[in-house]
Image: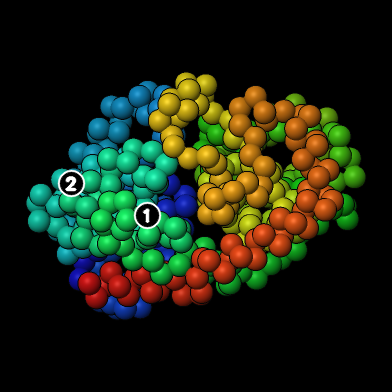
Amino acid sequence: MKYFIISGEPSGDLHGSKLIKGIFKSDPKAEIAFWGGDLMEKAGGKLLTHYNELAFMGFIEVLLNIFKILKNFKKCKKDILNFNPDKIIYIDYPGFNLRMCKWAKKRGFRNYYYISPQVWAWKEKRAEIIKKYIDEFYVVLPFEKNYFKKKHNINSNYFGHPLIDDIENFEPQLISFNKKPIISILPGSRKQEIKKILNKVIDVCKYFPEFQFVIAGVKHIDSKIYNNIISKSDSNIEIIYDNTYSLLKSSKLAIVTSGTATLETALLNIPQMVCYVTNPVNIFLAKLLVKIKFISLVNLIFDKKVINEFIQSDVNISNIKNEINLLLGEKGSIIKEEYKSLRRSLGTKGVSERISAHIVKS
């Protein structure tokens, strides 16, 4: 069969690469074309458009790039028609993918949505699109299956969270710098969030000279962006590119931007705090529209505050210093105990293969 996959960001590229491997295992003669990234290409699919051309974050950024986004819709439709797949798989990226799935369904394509849009947080009307235009729906957070069934009468498939596979298969390469204990900084994977977070966090490093602060860098971001910010600091700050799991496993604690990274940090059993800074207009609109109490996946899954979240002006030297000291003490141990139940709720190894097999057979 022929499969067309649409992924618009780094996390989707990771999940998509595992999905491609699983599809080939269940369907060795599969033909796969996709919008995604390098990991998906290495897994064996044919890359048509890289996610670097697609990733726009926040209300303002979307408006500023609206003409490029509209051009991408047109190009994606053309690619689908030319490839003529048996099944289209949408990975997260709801602003783009939910619009595409409506167009595709009207043209007779079979739609599979992997990693649910967070309609339980905002834009709940998106559930109507899912119900009407998606043939098979896959959720990855334990509370989502019950939410979609009870709230929207949508049947979904829950096979666990695919990060479980990454953690189970991960073989750590412990990292050290001058024998100092490490505090890692995970500033995200988009230029605008990296600049905003690092410029706020970087000044705290000088208050902990006994620790080595290390940034989890990503290679698709120009190194000048990291280095220009580091140059403003009085501290010796290192960068490690595309080796986040080893960095986290080597760390005493982590300062993390919200998103999948908070869940990865938890599954690797590292105490953390969440720091999030964005355009003030984005925050204003989010306060009007978003219905959730927390921004981190860890707290959302627990439905309580397990890790501290600092947003906008709360991302300051005083708060970060205080939280580092707490995490180095008893609070860090308490968080690690909480992580145990989180891991149990996310399923067992083989999640991606189970989802791929279901897509192939259904």
* Colour theme: rainbow
Q: Which mark is residue 251?
A: none
Q: Is residue 30 left or right of residue 18?
A: left
Q: Residues within 10 Å of mark 1 (few under 14, many from 20)?
A: some
Left or right of 325? Residue 271 is left
Q: Position of residue 331 (x, y in %)?
A: 78, 51
The numbered dot on residue 147 is 1
Mark 2 secondary-structure assignment: helix
Q: Residue 30 in the image: state x and y as whole percent.
A: 26, 72
Seen at 53% across and 66% down, the residue is: 345
Q: Disc 1 residue type?
A: Tyr
Q: Residue 81: x and y, percent?
A: 14, 52
Q: CA distance from mark 1 to mark 2?
A: 23 Å
**Number of marks in the rendered image:** 2
Q: Which mark is residue 102?
A: 2
Q: Quadrant of residue 120?
A: top left
Q: Quadrant of residue 229?
A: top right
Where 332 sits versus 204, above or below? Answer: below
| Quarter containing the N terminus | bottom left
Asked if 48 appears above or below 325 in the picture, the reply is below
Q: Position of residue 146 (x, y in %)?
A: 38, 59
Going by the picture, which residue comes out furthest to the front? 150
Amino acid at dot 2: Lys
Q: Residue at x 25, y 68 (%)?
A: 31
> Between 222 and 92, which is closer to the camera in this rendering?
92
Q: From this viewpoint, is residue 159 visible?
A: yes
SS at mark 1? helix
Pointers 1 and 2 in contact (C-beta within 8 Å): no
